[in-house]
Image: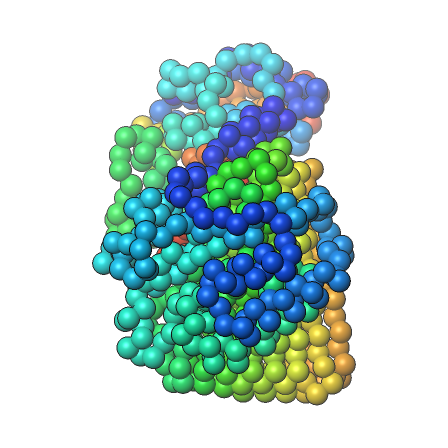
Amino acid sequence: MLVIKDLHAKINDKEILKGINLEVKAGEVHAIMGPNGSGKSTLASVLTGRELVEVTHGQVEFNGKNLLEMSPEIRSREGIFLSFQYPVEIPGVSMVNFMKAAVNEHRKYKGLGPLSASDFLKLLRERKELVEIDSALTNRSVNEGFSGGEKKKNEIFQMAMLEPKLAILDETDSGLDIDALRIVANGVNKLKRPDNAVVVITHYQRLLDYIVPDFVHILYNGRIVKSAGKELALELEKKGYDWIKNGEDL
Amino acid sequence: MTDEQDKILDEVTNSEYKYGFVTDVETEMIPKGLNEDVIRMISKKKEEPDWMLEFRLNAFRHWQKMEMPTWAHLTIPEINYQDIIYYAAPKRKAAPGSLDEIDPELKATFDKLGIPLEEQKMLTGVAVDAVMDSTSVKTTFRETLAEQGIIFCSMTEAIKEHPDLVRKYLASVVPPTDNFFAALNSAVFSDGSFCYIPKGVRCPMELSTYFRINAANTGQFERTLIVADDDSYVSYLEGCTAPMRDENQLHAAIVEIIAMENAEVKYSTVQNWYPGDKNGKGGIYNFVTKRGMCRGKNSKISWTQVETGSAITWKYPSCILLGDNSYSEFYSVAVTNNYQQADTGTKMIHIGKNTRSRIVSKGISAGFSNNSYRGLVKVLKGAENARNFSQCDSLLLGDKCGAHTFPYLEVENPSSIVEHEATTSKIGEDQIFYCNQRGLSTEDAVGLIINGYAKEVLNKLPMEFAVEAQKLLQISLEGSVG
């Protein structure tokens, strides 16, 4: 589904990614871990087309298409979803209208007509239940006045609405209490299907107790320095990142 | 980033002003220039009584002694008042009355503007007075309204048919000496709408005036007078457009509203005069005096305006709160793009006891434009327990535009409470990217964010208007953020 080959990228002339190679297949869950400043969020920015990041070398293919040539909205419509680390507030724009616009853009891209009001509301209700989001949230403006936990739940709700092929969860666990963490993880697990994939970016093992990865990659200094199964996350939790930084055992 | 921004900016500026066409219609014009003879000529063409001519001449003599105001945060090129045609009217084929007598070209023009003049074609309950250049072309639903005693007609007809009402109320809120442009308008105004709602009548449909400038080198000077008698209600809409021309054209109007005891008047404007091109060439100078007076107890006047057009806007829809317990509100969204300039706001003058006012102003500036809010809240000595709340927000798109806020407070009564809040923010790339990531294009994202920002004001507009206004906001700002 996603094939990253020798990806280099910089922000303001500073090289952040220094040759990333990664392949994600349908049905898989990948975790990307690493210390602060290793390039995890930059990778998410490159994949979603954020302009502040400049790709200097390498290729990214998504379902056989050149991802790097696509605008951010096309990537979204092609099926890439980012659960933001810091979801922004959009005052005065109701979640319902926001989602209606987004869902209909996705449908248009697939050659489908817009959903009728009743079908849309039905979908909205279904997905709200699926991710256990408080019904009142969708009547409020996008993320406005939401608590940290509500913002993250709201991200997973949007993911449920848009049914992406590849979901990237950027530190979705940060700022969540244990109950919210469970709800968020449950939502992700319920949305898991053989034809979609998830990339979880996190510092901690904690989230991976709930969203169990097939592969764990350690990103350090702009490169993936180690890849293994889920046991790698446990090892990291125990040993910290220092052994990676010191270049031991690689 | 900058490339992208330039690209999108380019797209905007090439996105056409939708209403910029010119109607090819035979127009009767008087020669350029302004003097007493011209005023006599206008008055004669309108077959006016002597008192009206006197009114005009007095205003003109006063105007000659006045100077153009310079206090606004605007750069206004010198206007040669002798180089303007003060009267231009589409020629009538026969006496006005039935629709058949209206030039098909004119009918087509208003159709194109989305204002059908045939009553049976109008789906929504809106009665329209359609004004082209200096004259009213057609007022719809007059007979239906007359059944309830409502008078809705052009100002010219009102002067002839209802002289007592006109004499009683005309200039009672905005005297000819009020300001430079009010004096000019009082001298040369050529038409406009008149509306009288009798006691206890709730006007069953929205009334509206649609102003269209068509002829070149002319100015449009119209007057609107709305009188709501005791216990009545009316909602009034105003729309305006003009052709795209390289020359600036002057529009100096007056709107007066009088609300008697327990009466309520809602006045909504979607102002979309031609704003000039992307380099600031052409466009309408919109210098307008709008003022309401809550004369009776418990009366209410609300102004809602969406200002997207005009090269220069100078306009402060205001209210004098004379009756005890009267209430006024001013809700405004003003958008400026490219080289547009706007200095707009309101004045709330509290005279009666327990009078209340509310001001919500949302400015949006893009391109190289300048957008100022100017507001006065004045509480006079006798205005016990007066209340005012003002909120002025400014949103900047890009870094070459300006937003300014000039609030003035004059409070002479210690029991009053006056509050003012102001914010300035920039539209965030983060917000746009968030929308992009959910599949929305940047254009749609900006539209969504702007409409969200302006929602409180848009919600005040009548339904059909709100949809138009939303689209207009989006078009006016299309791509001004990269």
Residue at 72%, 60% in the rendered image: B64
Task: Count the numbered circles shown.
Answer: 0
- Quadrant where the C terminus of chain B sits is top right
Residue in the foreground of this view, choosing between B187 and B337: B187
Residue at 69%, 23% in the rendered image: A12
* In this view, A143 is above or below A212: below
Coloring applied to the structure:
rainbow
Residue B351 left/right relative to B205: right
* In this view, B6 is above or below B336: above
Q: Residue furthest left?
A: B120
Residue at 74%, 61% in the rendered image: B66
- Quadrant where the N terminus of chain B sits is top right
* In this view, B66 is above or below A228: below
Please indicate, yes or no, whether residue B252 appears anywhere in the rendered image: yes
Residue in the foreground of this view, choosing between A1 and A48: A48
Residue in the foreground of this view, choosing between B298 and B8: B298
Please indicate, yes or no, whether residue B388 appears anywhere in the rendered image: no
**Horizontal and vertical percent position of residue B23:** 40, 41
* In this view, A52 is above or below A129: above
Tell me the quarter of the picture where residue A236 sits.
top right
**Horizontal and vertical percent position of residue B245:** 53, 37
**Horizontal and vertical percent position of residue B169:** 53, 78
Residue at 71%, 78% in the rendered image: B379
